[in-house]
Image (cartoon, rainbow, N blue to C red):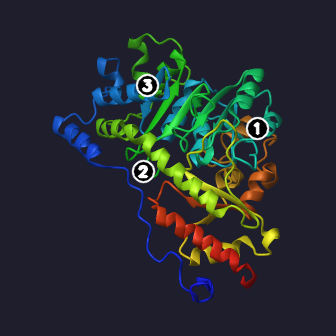
Amino acid sequence: MENELALLGGSKTIDKPINRYNSIGAEEMEAAKSVVESGILSRFLGCWDEDFYGGDKVREFEEAWRTYFNVKHAVSVNSNTSGLIAAIGALGIEPGDEVIVSPWTMCATATSILIWNAIPIFADIESETFNLDPNSIRRCITPNTKAIIVTDIFGHAARLDEIMEIAREYGLSVIEDAAQAPGARYGKRFVGTVADIGVFSLNYHKHIHTGEGGMCVTENDSLAERLQLIRNHAEAVVEDKGVTNLSNMIGFNFRLGEIEAAIGIEQLKKLDGQLDSIICRANSLTQGLEGLRGLRTPRVMDGCTHVYYVYPLVYDAKATAVSRKRLLEALRSEGLRIGGGYQNLHLLPLFQRKTAYGTRGFPWKFFDPEEKISYAKTICPVAEELHDHTFLVLPMCLFDYSNNDVELIIKAFRKVWRNLDSL
């Protein structure tokens, strides 16, 4: 029975739940306790004041982030989503401007563009790293294009030098959404620090977390100030601070609390160790799965490191004569937590119906009355093919895999592959 697929009546390879990932330890508990005992859970004031920039722990966390990532400015926010909204606003994006974005990313990467009444334009991805394809970016550029949001998806850098070269050629700004790639390397630089603004996520299923939270980084003094203003009620601050550029100075409350910042300080200290552990597990998976017919393990570009927010795979059903759906049934029956496909944002109802605000098609019908902008299924063929037919994904940051867990995952895959003929 051990060699028979669980789907067909055999025993499961993985018969016990794998522990959820939890990086919170005694250090974080003590840090949070100290903040609670201080009675100062937040020290932001939404006016021009010494406390406009937040409390001691927020500032300490930002300083630690600046030092680790070797950047001039770090601006904490209460989520990666908030950071993206602040970043787009800081760049001075106007209503009706077009911003190129990937269809393979968290929905907030695209919807943050709509917050400023700008228009998301979806470029296709490349099949190797699943990041934006520079050639597709070029094809999407129009006179209305003002920025690119490039996501370093799954923990691996996009082709950032090529994308930045395109941006400089056309006078475009670039935001890196590095939510899934903290600590990943792109040459000698950290992912998230190459573009005009980089944004990181600190929510609970990321490599390090503060419950909810985010961080923006930039080398530009003016952009840093605008990020800080948008984060904290800009409209109430600009006059007393002497700010004269009022573009997008509608502020929000994107402020990070002192408890979250205190936890983040301790989490950041653990990042190198967390990455070493997750990369080691991923490398073991790659070694163990190499050679399985029709299965492609993750690619890592020269000069890059992959920090494996998830472990992405590509499956060729033609090579095995087994459909992806049937393969997933067999793998899941063995106890694997594995998914197929990934969201294609351009196919969400929001974009298919082109209705973001109210019911009258705003902002599209106002800025694109002739409906030249298309979100048809054919616009991103690589992303669509991967989602519909070939992509597989194993969660990494959600679980605390032991060496034995990794061995069992490999064993489950190899068991299914030995029995492909029975599927």
Q: Observer-nearest residue: 366 or 271?
A: 271
- C-alpha gap between disc 3 and disc 2: 23 Å
Q: Is residue 146 above or below residue 101?
A: above
Which residue position holds label 2? 204
Q: CA distance from mark 1 to mark 2?
A: 38 Å
Residue drawn at the location 57% of the way across and 54% of the way down: 282
Query: Dot 3: within a 10 Å radius of its alpha carbon, few (fewer than 14), some, or many (20 or more) residues?
Result: few
Residue in the foreground of this view, choosing between 193 and 344: 193
Please name the residue shown 69% across and 74% down the image: 417
Q: Is residue 376 above or below residue 57?
A: below
Amino acid carrying label 3: it is Thr
Mark 2 Cα-neighbour bin, 10 Å: few <14, some 14–19, many ≥20: some
Marks 1 and 3: which is nearer the front? 3
Q: Looking at the image, is mark 1 or mark 2 earlier in the sequence?
A: 2
| Residue drawn at (26%, 47%) of the image | 26
Quarter of the figure with residue 78: top left
Q: Helix, strand, or loop for circle 3? A: helix
**Residue 397 shown left or right of residue 349 in the figure:** left
* Residue bearing the label numbered 3: 67
Which is nearer the N-term, disc 1 or disc 3? 3
Residue beneath label 1, please? Answer: 368
